[in-house]
Amino acid sequence: MTTELKIGQLAKDVGVNIETIRYYERLGMLSPTARLPSGYRLYNREAQRRLRLIKNAQALGFTLHEIEELLDLRVRSKARCGDVQRKAEAKLRRVEAKVRDLQALARALRSLIHNCRAGQPTDRCPILKALEDERHGKGRTVRKEVN
Amino acid sequence: MTTELKIGQLAKDVGVNIETIRYYERLGMLSPTARLPSGYRLYNREAQRRLRLIKNAQALGFTLHEIEELLDLRVRSKARCGDVQRKAEAKLRRVEAKVRDLQALARALRSLIHNCRAGQPTDRCPILKALEDERHGKGRTVRKEVN
DNA sequence: CTTGACTCTGTACTATGGTACAGGGTGTAT
DNA sequence: ATACACCCTGTACCATAGTACAGAGTCAAG
């Protein structure tokens, strides 16, 4: 059987846009395994797995750059599973921190909703007041995104 | 006392780039409270609170667009708790959904990490294997961002 | 009255993760 | 042999969230 797919078949199979596949190629993340004389790209099962890995890892909150690192680890045979594990652990810590932040915000929002019943003006909103806090003054670096 | 700050002082105070303040102004999120005859922007304490609110809310993962909504609630003095309550409830639901997404993501990461035995070569790494799964084949929509 | 720090406007550029053409060539079924 | 789906390259464009100038004007100290 032919395991070689043309770009449109691969796109449909994995559920991504054709342009996205070519975009990943531009980034050096996913090359066709062959080309027809016409220039048509051909992809084998390995490429298909690689593309699926990209999409799945993305759904877990990894950036394309981080995914490149994971892919590199997989390809470099001297790299060990522990390297992958450490990257996953670092990502997990960032995700957990983000969850804590959002839970704090959810608590503040619940408190706002609770205190809002009496028809007070919005300039006494606890959430808005809380957000005005000088938690990040004078050049302090704010921990950024989860990604 | 003079509560009016020039842009550089405000930037230093809150810990953001001067260009960022002007960028927020272009977006209509933060206007100077006055201008000197020379055109220099002046900001009062209220503007300072507003800027801090933007940065704090951003650190919690809100987009600038969502922050605009929060700011609108605060500034419209006719807005009462009823208005705020509805906005806050909608926001809370989005935050809670976000927390659930992130927790699912964290569980997936923990499970991957747990199954990973550090000494194995990466071509047997369960994390990478799992990421190759056909969890999202044939047009399945992958839940997107973590934000 | 000059120096240096600060500010102004306007435009261009960065990164991230794509999407959308234009203007061709290819492959195959009828 | 011709219609039509598919593919090619190249470039431009989208949103988000800024950053980096250029070239000019302003302000305060010495």
Image: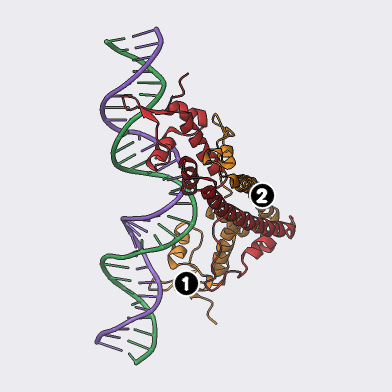
Chain colours: A orange, B red, C green, D purple
Image quadrant where residue B104 sits: bottom right
Number of disc labels: 2
Q: Mark 2 lies on which chain?
A: A
The reply to whether residue B125 is visible in this rendering is no
Residues under labels 2 and 1: Cα distance?
40 Å
Q: In this view, does D30 lie to the left or right of A95?
A: left
Q: Which disc, if any, is residue A96?
A: 2
Crowd rating for badge 2 (residues with CA inside 10 Å; few <14, some 14–19, many 20+): some
Which element carries disc 2, helix, strand or loop?
helix
* Front label number (2 vs 1): 2
The reply to whether residue A127 is visible in this rendering is yes
Quarter of the figure that contains the N terminus of chain A: bottom right
Q: In this view, does A31 lie to the left or right of A108?
A: left
Furthest-front residue in view? A118
Residue at numbered disc 1: A42
Nearer to the camera, B51 or A39: B51
Q: Is residue B120 left or right of residue B78?
A: right
Nearer to the camera, A75 or B17: B17
Q: Where is residue B48 in the image (x, y as percent from the top left)?
A: 48, 32
Q: Which chain carries label 1?
A: A
Tell me if residue B74 comes above or below residue B128 in the rendering.
Answer: above
Nearer to the camera, A57 or A129: A129
Q: Where is residue B123 in the image (x, y as percent from the top left)?
A: 66, 62
Residue drawn where x is 42% and y is 40% of the image = B24
